[in-house]
Amino acid sequence: MVSLSIAAACAIFTVLISATDWIDGDSRSWAGTLRGCATLPWAKKTGSGERRTIDMGWLGSDAVNIKIPAQVHYQSSPKPQASVSGDADLISHVRLRDGTLEWDTVEWDRLVDCFPANDLVVHFAGPAVTAWTLNGSSQLDLSDIKQDVLRITMHGSGTVTASGEAKEVSLDAAGSGRADLGRLVAQKTSVNMKGSADLKLADIKQDVLRITMHGSGVVTASGAAHEVSLESAGSGRADLGQLITERASAQIHGSADVDLAPRQDADISVSGSAVVKLHGAVARISSHVSGSGKIKQVP
């Protein structure tokens, strides 16, 4: 019995040591992640106090992957350039390699969320960047962009704000991140949210808005759209009651709370205890309810 217990303990220890947490294609040991902020000496380092700005030699790229906690600002410009500002000790460990903003070593990479995002400020300027990826608590501000396609991917608790124009916009958010795209003019927006993410789309005017939600996320939108489609699984909140649309379709599974404002066609399916409220007069309603859920018409 003792030998079996020892063997089991060894097996568990081996699993913990060899287990990896796959994040955006990178493998990191659980042990390394757990000891990162608490015990590595850099986590307690307050820095030299000297603030510096250095040029990062960016030549432009279609995609940027942010893997450090930083405030990142981007503005369209004919000439590509990038700089990082902050504590001299911190920025000496920042690298920009093939469009990836990261720490210079694996040890520093484990500190992805050990520093507040406002400790580092990164400025990008250049031709259109079509794909942005945020990891951890990064903050991204896209200012006055004008491009055909914009793809934003969020992992963690980061924040995104954007203004300008993009014909097609896609947002893929996993975690507790927040995005405000209300000042971004788009023809088509596609959203895929997992977890407790929060998305705001205020005073928009576009052709198509497609939203997929898994978890307890929140989407708030107002303005006008020709077509709105919503798929929700979980306890999410879709507050689209002030988004006037010609056609709305919704497939709701779980206990979500949904508000829609279609004027011509509403195709609504509810499975579970969800409540869907249809605001205003609707010319045609097709509905199906399975469970204790409800579809209500409200003024």
Image: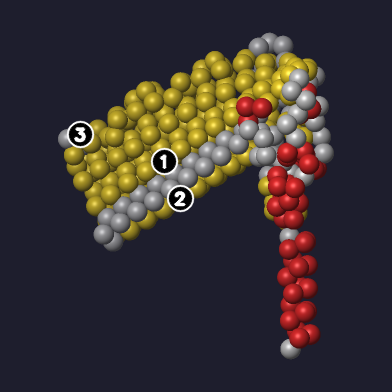
Q: Give the residue at mark 1.
A: 218
Q: Amino acid at mark 3?
A: Gly
Give the camera-side residue of 198 and 240. Answer: 198
Q: Residues within 10 Å of mark 3 (few under 14, many from 20)?
A: some
Q: How many marks?
A: 3
Give the camera-side residue of 240 and 66. Answer: 66
Quadrant where the C terminus is found in the figure: top left
Q: Is residue 251 left or right of residue 137?
A: left
> How far, Cα to Cα, is label 2 from label 3?
28 Å
Q: State the SS at label 3.
A: loop
Q: Is residue 246 left or right of residue 198?
A: left
Residue 215's disc is 2
Quadrant where the N terminus is found in the figure: bottom right
Dot 2 or dot 3: first in sequence order is 2
Q: State the SS at label 1.
A: strand
Percent position of residue 33, x then y: 72, 50
Q: Are marks 2 and 3 in contact (CB under 8 Å)?
A: no
Q: State the SS at label 2.
A: strand
Q: Give the residue at mark 3.
A: 280
Percent position of residue 281, x then y: 18, 34
Looking at the image, the residue that sits furthest to the top is 78
The residue mark sitting in front, 3 or 1, is: 1
Residue at (74, 55) in percent of width and height: 31
Dot 3 or dot 1: first in sequence order is 1
Residue at (81, 34) in percent of width and height: 104
> How far, Cα to Cα, is label 2 from label 1?
9 Å
Q: Amino acid at mark 2?
A: Gly
